[in-house]
């Protein structure tokens, strides 16, 4: 009888311990899954297309992607993309005589805009108002005058406003830039240090609309006149939980733009057959409409 009693007690304890152990394992797995979900990558992709044909031909293709993840106590963000536009007019040639001829047409579009970039940034907060930021970027824009531009930045920043619908922050950093121009400028250094100030604003206008604006100022410490400004604005409208339409306007100002070659003519308009170096336009603007996929 004592043996049976002890066996019943042991069995009862075992039956009570197993559910508790199972419940503990389930809770541990749920906590681990929640932590992995919080640290998971977030991706978004952008696609913009434009095609026209007939009397003129225009082809525009744009592709971009963004990835974000909480990592090492901060946030790591990676962004890459490119935009290429080709355009041309249709040329018609008549073959035969004035009384009888056939017409052939051909179009040979050439690149008129091309820009590729890749950027990475890591930001870690020390408090609700102060954070550290560091990053690197590469860009290619031959129509703006440079084959490649590599930039490194490191500094601190502060958060002005952070609510559920509004975010405003500023960053202040030291930069290093190495630029390879299409046409070398003998009076301009290809590698230089600088000071960068950036302000980023985000506002949720409605549950399905977001407005973002970023202004970046970069000062060349070796040439005070060489100031660059980059203003990027975008308005995103959600179609559903995964798709959105995004309209963007980017204005890039370079106070000391890269050089290009221009034919030299006499005051009367007679070509001399010579080429001279002249600066490019200081302002470039780009307007895009893209389909954004979030996953």
Image (cartoon, rainbow, N blue to C red):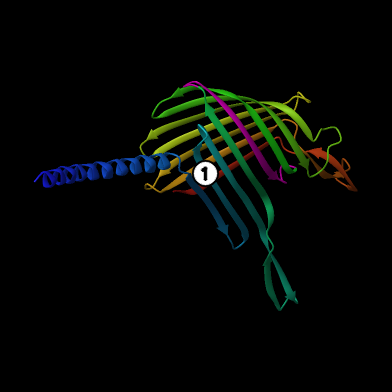
Image coordinates for residue 122, horizontal then vertical, percent: 57, 34
**Magenta stretch: includes residue 142:** yes
**Magenta stretch: includes residue 197:** no
Count of picture labels: 1
**Residue at 65% from the left image edge and 47% from the top image edge:** 116
Of 138 and 270, the residue lying toward us = 138
**Residue at 50% from the left image edge and 43% from the top image edge:** 247
Of 15 and 88, the residue lying toward us = 15
Image coordinates for residue 130, horizontal then vertical, percent: 52, 21
Q: Residues within 10 Å of mark 1 (few under 14, many from 20)?
A: some
Image coordinates for residue 132, horizontal then vertical, percent: 57, 26
Bounds of the magenta span? 127-145
**Quarter where residue 36 is shown:** top left
Q: Is residue 56 above or below residue 68?
A: below
**Quarter where residue 199 is shown:** top right
Of 97 and 115, the residue lying toward us = 115
**Which residue is identified by label 1?**
67
């Amino acid at each position: 009888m004592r043996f049976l009693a002890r066996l019943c007690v042991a069995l009862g304890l075992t039956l009570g311990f197993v559910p508790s152990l199972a419940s503990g394992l389930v809770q541990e797995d749920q906590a681990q899954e929640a932590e992995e979900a919080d640290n998971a990558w977030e991706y978004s992709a952008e696609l913009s297309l434009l095609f026209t044909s007939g009397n003129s031909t225009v082809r525009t293709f744009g592709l971009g992607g963004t990835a974000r993840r909480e990592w090492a106590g901060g946030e790591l963000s990676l962004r890459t993309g490119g935009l290429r536009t080709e355009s041309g007019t249709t040329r018609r040639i008549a073959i035969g005589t004035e009384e009888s001829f056939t017409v052939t047409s051909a179009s040979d579009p050439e690149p008129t805009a091309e820009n590729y970039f890749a950027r990475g940034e890591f930001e870690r907060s020390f408090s609700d108002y102060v954070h550290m930021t560091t990053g690197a970027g590469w860009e290619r824009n031959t129509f703006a005058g440079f084959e490649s531009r590599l930039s490194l930045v490191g500094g601190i920043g502060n958060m002005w406003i952070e609510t559920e619908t509004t975010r405003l922050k500023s960053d202040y950093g030291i930069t290093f830039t190495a630029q390879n121009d299409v046409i070398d400028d003998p009076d301009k250094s290809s590698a230089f240090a600088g000071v960068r100030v950036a302000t980023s604003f985000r506002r949720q206008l409605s549950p399905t609309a977001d407005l973002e604006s970023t202004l970046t100022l970069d000062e060349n410490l070796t040439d005070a006149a060489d100031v660059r400004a980059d203003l990027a604005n975008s308005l995103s409208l959600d179609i559903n939980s995964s798709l959105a339409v995004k309209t963007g306007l980017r204005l890039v100002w370079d106070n000391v733009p890269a050089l290009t070659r221009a034919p030299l003519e006499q005051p009367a308009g007679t070509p001399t057959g010579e080429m001279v170096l002249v600066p490019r336009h200081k302002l470039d603007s780009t307007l895009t409409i893209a389909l954004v996929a979030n996953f």
